[in-house]
């Protein structure tokens, strides 16, 4: 190869140099000078292509196409760097921000606090061997009242007014109708919980809403006793609120249990000393319970002489308020993200706290 001739080595050298100079061009003028320098009428690559004629015939196609490839690569690098400079990106500042800043936090949403409480409660009962039963929110009068031993026009119905679809269909006031539905379908023994939404025609105030949540419990077998009820309820309260919590059964009336009780636990706010939250009693009511009434067994098709059972109905909103210090039951369904999001902070993603 003659001194002024071109070959693969010379071309590689030219490309390396051109690439270096392109990368180091800090502004658009320098860049444009380089373009003219390499691709202009008297540019290095232009001249190289023109000089091909001096090469031996057999070398021409190879060197020719090599030069064209280099021109192609030059052009695309040129475009890339030009775009970078125009966007204010250069080698001195390769990223248009401060990469050491913490990342942006992403909004991930999270489970509703009632959902979380429901899940925690369910898990405790699953540990005790309960399984899940479900029933409709739009319920028959028959299951919500009649089969639970609330006769039609009986004053006991006054304790639970609701919204009627028609004379026979209503929005359930309690999860107790699932007791009867479940016993109709399955033979004893059975041990189930049934969480869900219930409705009442209430005037809303900080502790009453027209929609809230309950969890029913039902255990039917031979020789189930009040002691068994007390055991399971106490285990639940200790697991959910802590072992130091005391539990008290207070005689009460429900048409579908006999005997019946309301279950109180030590006030979480004053630990039993008495404060405004527990109305100075030191106790807070969290559920209704009792031994399944023989009439309910009869409605469900069970023989009241051969089985016994207990049932309880837990206020989910109630225990959520107690555990998390929520002052107004209406907050749960007000759909205010400022209130709800405080319970899912843990699931925010990102470096910033
Ligand atoms: N269903 C009753 C209520 O809503 C609670 C309850 C359930 C009482 C089961 C006894 C047995 O008030």
Image (cartoon, rainbow, N blue to C red):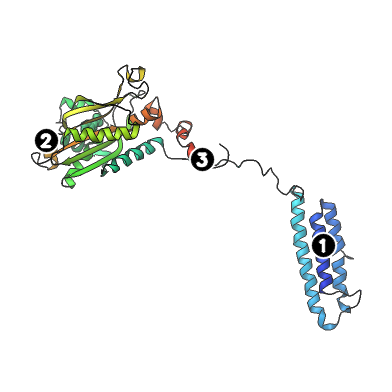
Residue 180 position, x and y percent, is 18, 40
Q: Nearer the viewer, residue 289 or 43?
A: 289
Q: Give the residue furthest to the left.
A: 305
* Circles 2 and 1: CB atoms closer than 8 Å: no
Q: Which residue is mark 2?
A: 294
Q: Quadrant of residue 247?
A: top left
> Which of the two discs, 3 and 1, labels the residue nearer the N terminus?
1
Distance from mark 2 CB to nearest ligand 1 atom below 8 Å? no
Q: Give the residue furthest to the right.
A: 3
Q: Determine whether 317 is above or below 279 in the image.
A: below
Q: Determine whether 137 is above or below 154 in the image.
A: below
> Which of the two discs, 2 and 3, labels the residue nearer the N terminus?
2
Q: Quadrant of residue 119?
A: top left
Q: Which residue is mark 3?
A: 348
- Residue at 31%, 39% (x, y): give it: 124
Q: Which secondary structure, mark 1?
A: helix
Distance from mark 1 CB to nearest ligand 1 atom below 8 Å? no
Q: Which residue is mark 1?
A: 18
Q: Tag on residue 83?
A: none
């Amino acid at each position: 190869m003659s001194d002024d001739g071109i070959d693969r080595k010379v071309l590689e050298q030219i490309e390396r140099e051109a690439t270096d100079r392109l990368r180091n061009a800090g502004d658009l003028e320098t860049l444009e000078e380089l373009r003219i320098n390499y691709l202009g009428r008297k540019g290095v690559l232009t001249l190289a292509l023109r000089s091909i004629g001096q090469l031996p015939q057999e070398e021409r196609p190879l060197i020719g196409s090599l030069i064209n490839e280099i021109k192609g690569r030059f052009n695309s690098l040129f475009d890339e760097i030009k775009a970078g400079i125009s966007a204010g990106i250069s080698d001195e500042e390769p990223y248009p921000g401060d990469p050491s800043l913490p990342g942006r936090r992403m909004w991930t949403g999270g489970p509703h606090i009632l959902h979380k409480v429901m899940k925690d409660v369910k898990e405790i009962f699953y540990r005790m061997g309960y399984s899940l039963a479900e029933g409709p929110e739009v319920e028959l009068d028959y299951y919500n009242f009649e089969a639970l031993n609330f006769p039609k026009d009986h004053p006991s119905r006054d304790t639970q007014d609701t919204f009627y679809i028609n004379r026979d269909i209503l929005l359930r006031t309690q999860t107790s109708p699932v007791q009867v539905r479940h016993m109709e379908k399955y033979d004893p023994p059975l041990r189930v919980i049934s969480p869900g939404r219930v409705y009442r025609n209430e005037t809303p105030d900080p502790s009453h809403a027209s929609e809230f949540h309950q969890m029913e419990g039902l255990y039917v077998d031979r020789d189930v006793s009040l002691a068994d009820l007390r055991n399971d309820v106490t285990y639940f309260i200790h697991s959910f609120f802590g072992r130091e919590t005391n539990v008290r059964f207070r005689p009460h009336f429900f048409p579908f249990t006999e005997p019946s009780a309301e279950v109180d636990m030590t006030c979480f706010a004053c630990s039993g000393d008495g404060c405004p939250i527990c109305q100075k009693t030191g106790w807070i009511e969290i559920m209704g319970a009792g031994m399944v009434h023989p009439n309910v067994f009869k409605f469900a098709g069970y023989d009241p002489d051969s089985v016994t059972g207990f049932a309880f109905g837990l206020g989910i909103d109630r225990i959520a308020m107690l555990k998390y210090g929520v002052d107004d039951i209406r907050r749960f369904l007000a759909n205010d993200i400022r209130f709800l999001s405080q319970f899912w902070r843990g699931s925010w993603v990102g470096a910033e706290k």
